[in-house]
Amino acid sequence: MRLTCPLCGERDRREFYYYGADDYLRRPAEGAPAAAWDDYLHNRDNPAGETRDLWYHEAGCGQWLAVMRNTVTHAVLAVDLVAPVAQKRGRK
Amino acid sequence: MRYSGFKVFTEGLFGNKGWRPAWRDPAPKAEYDAIIIGGGGHGLSTAYYLAKNHGLTNIAVLEKGYLGGGNIGRNTTIVRANYFLPGNSEFYSHSLKLWEGLEADLNYNVMHSQRGLINLFHSDGQRDAFARRGNAMVNQGDDAELLDRDGVRALLPYLDFEQTRFPIYGGLLHRRGGTARHDAVAWGYARGADQRGVDLIQNCEVTGIDVENGRVTGVQTTRGAIRAKKVGIVVAGRSSQVAAMAGLRLPIESHILQAFVTEGLKPVIDHVISFGMGHFYISQSDKGGLVFGGDLDFYASYAARGNLPMVEHVMEAGMTLMPMIGRAKVLRSWGGIMDMSPDGSPVIDRTPVDGLYIDCGWNYGGFKAVPASGWCMAHLMATGQPHEVARRFTLNRFATGHLLDEEGTGSQHNLH
């Protein structure tokens, strides 16, 4: 599998660190109930098909990437930078 | 039909015409007392022990493909009880004891071979950690011996002790560890369950789970609706999909684990060798093939095939550990779908839906657990109470913090 980093271009899978499903982008508000934190940290849709997960371009530009891909075929559908999305959400 | 050496002999004399199918192929009934979803190792052993230990025989195992066609049909077959944490230790100890009586119990040759398992260590710190693990195993009533370098050399003279990236300091020997014939385990449990009246229904995919007022009432399948007051989900890598039919979201992420087999060779590796620093382990099958594997590919996947970086890594690790295998030709490789839990330990528990039970999260260690998993899942489904040795395998332990983190790396999906 190869990922096309928006900044660096197409790169070998070994340059990237896999973090997990993009649930990590939906951090509960401070003071949210424990169940919300459990869901955020542990429970997953874990789809057989299209999914969106977070990868870190460790041996490249050091950016966090949101990767749309298919878990059954390993096809990579889109790779986006996480920072602009996360910043927008954080400053609203 | 009871299998025996005498039976083999007499059948040989009369043209082998007396053998019968090992189990029936029944059509599903409209209702059962209990349904097991998943005809793999864990599902079949659950059905077997429900019938044998609890007298529940009006039950069905529903399998979407054929019996034993998932991870029990393709794995690296290692059987061991070398866990450290209370909660895991007694469970795997129980499982190993069941393994030791399994062939007599099932009247089926599962080729259980207690050839000994050796975990190598490569530093003083690792030696201390393994000494501690060995003590935990002995305290549990199992066996462990700490070998120094010469001790390992006497058993495994072909390892590269000096020139490798990780010079070998010694190993932890678990003599009762070993291997078994994976398919035979599924077939033995299937036959035993069938003989006790369990309906094993193949080509029957569950497409929905019926829930009324918070209670399970049955399942929808490709062969019609089937009612049952108790339903057990035992579907390994597909746990998230099946649980979602009942509206549940599990602490599971499915990952790929690759393994490899070489052409058949004369006997050369007598034990199971685990080289943790290189993420590599190996044994030799009775057919002669070297069976080996490494770590996960480390991203969520259902592709049932892996990627080349892990192939390369595993080959490199094997070559640095035992250069003698360099000229063996790899026959095939495969990728299994592992139901990874955040702490690396399994779940055998009730769910928020009454009458619906789940057995999942076996990570990459489900094979050795097959007997005890079925034993404990059967106990749970029959009595409604967790079995003593599986009482910590709860579904909500990630929320409450009662983790079983054997590696001590944290409760996070990408760390186990």
Image (spheres, rainbow, N blue to C red):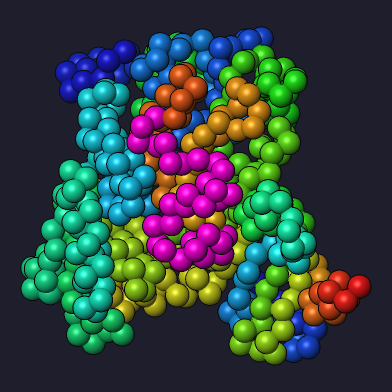
**Horizontal relation, residue B310 to residue B321: left or right:** right
Q: Residue at x 51, y 10 (%)?
A: B58
In depth, the one of A92 and A21 nearer the eye is: A92
Please tell me whether residue A64 is drawn above or below residue B403 in the rendered image. below
In the drawing, does residue B355 fall left or right of residue B155?
right
Quarter assignment of residue B169: bottom left
Relative image position of residue B243 (x, y in whole percent): 66, 37
At which x and y percent is residue A85? 85, 74
Is residue B63 shown to the viewer in this render?
A: no
Q: Nearer the viewer, residue B235 or B146?
A: B146
Q: Which residue is more in the foreground, B30 or B262?
A: B30
Q: In this view of the protein, which residue sits in the foreground, B287 or A25?
A: A25
Name which residue lies at 21% across and 71% down: B127
Side (left or right) of A49 relative to B291 = right
Residue shown at the point (47%, 45%) measured from the top left: B346
| Image location of residue B104, percent across then percent down | 22, 25
Q: Is residue B392 magenta?
A: yes
Q: Position of residue B295 (x, y in %)?
A: 45, 65
User: What kind of secondary structure does the magenta stretch mostly adopt?
Assistant: loop
Magenta extent: B387-416
B76 in relation to B388, above or below: below
